[in-house]
């Protein structure tokens, strides 16, 4: 097993409605979808976003699209018209979700590395290689 950023397996889009943000995470390849399901849980997303999300996180699975939709309540500082945030729409949340770490089985890790994608460097020594 190797650790990669989610961005190596998927892309994402974010939207908003009031004080709720939703993020779609879409696998680049069908074989990456089970990894996303395993690691991008509502609990892990809530922890990853920390104090940014004050309400619950709900995950909806879209298996025919190899995607999930995450609904983050209380995530926009009150909403576009009330928030003092530099990003009151939460568009940057798609980039934030893609910085999550996911554990990838060896066969998929090899496939990713052959495509030029790098595992997360855990130490300074790993970062040099």
Image: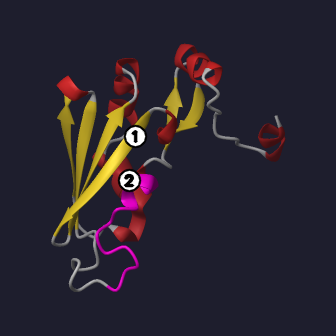
Residue 113: image quadrant is top right
In the rendered structure, find residue 94 and report the number of the disc placed on it.
2
Residue 26 in percent (x, y) is at 32, 35
Query: Mark 1 to mark 2: distance in Å?
Result: 8 Å
User: Colour scheme used in the picture?
Assistant: secondary structure
For the residues bearing labels 1 and 2, Cβ distance under 8 angstroms: yes
Left/right placement of residue 32 relative to residue 79 reads right
Left/right placement of residue 105 relative to residue 92 reads right
Say whether residue 85 is magenta: yes
Residue at x 58%, y 34% (from the top left corner): 3
In the rendered structure, find residue 24 and report the number of the disc placed on it.
none
Residue 25 in percent (x, y) is at 32, 41
Q: Residue furthest top?
A: 107
Q: Quadrant of the N terminus?
A: top right
Depth check: give the residue in front, 85 or 73.
Answer: 85
Say whether residue 35 is magenta: no
Residue 24 in percent (x, y) is at 27, 45
Q: Quadrant of the C terminus?
A: top right
The local crowd at label 2, few if under 14, some if 14 to 19, many if 20 or more residues have their Cα within 10 Å, is: some
The local crowd at label 1, few if under 14, some if 14 to 19, many if 20 or more residues have their Cα within 10 Å, is: some
Residue 31: image quadrant is top left
Q: In the structure shown, which secondary structural element does the residue marked by tag 1 occupy?
A: strand
Depth check: give the residue in front, 17 or 50.
Answer: 17
Residue at x 51%, y 35% (from the top left corner): 8
Q: Is residue 123 above or below residue 79?
A: above
Magenta region: 84-96
In the rendered structure, find residue 11 and report the number of the disc placed on it.
1
Q: In the structure shown, which secondary structural element does the residue marked by tag 2 occupy?
A: helix
């Amino acid at each position: 097993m190797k650790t990669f950023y989610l961005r190596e397996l998927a892309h994402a889009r974010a939207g908003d409605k009031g004080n709720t943000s939703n993020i779609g995470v879409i696998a680049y390849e069908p074989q990456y979808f089970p990894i996303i399901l395993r690691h991008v849980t509502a609990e892990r997303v809530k922890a990853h976003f920390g104090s940014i999300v004050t309400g619950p996180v709900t995950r909806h699975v879209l298996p025919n699209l190899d995607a999930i939709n995450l609904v983050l309540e209380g995530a926009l500082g009150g909403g576009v018209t009330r928030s003092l945030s530099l990003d009151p729409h939460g568009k940057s949340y798609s980039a934030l979700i893609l910085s999550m770490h996911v554990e990838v089985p060896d066969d998929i890790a090899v496939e990713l590395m052959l495509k030029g994608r790098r595992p997360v460097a855990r130490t300074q020594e790993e970062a040099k290689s």
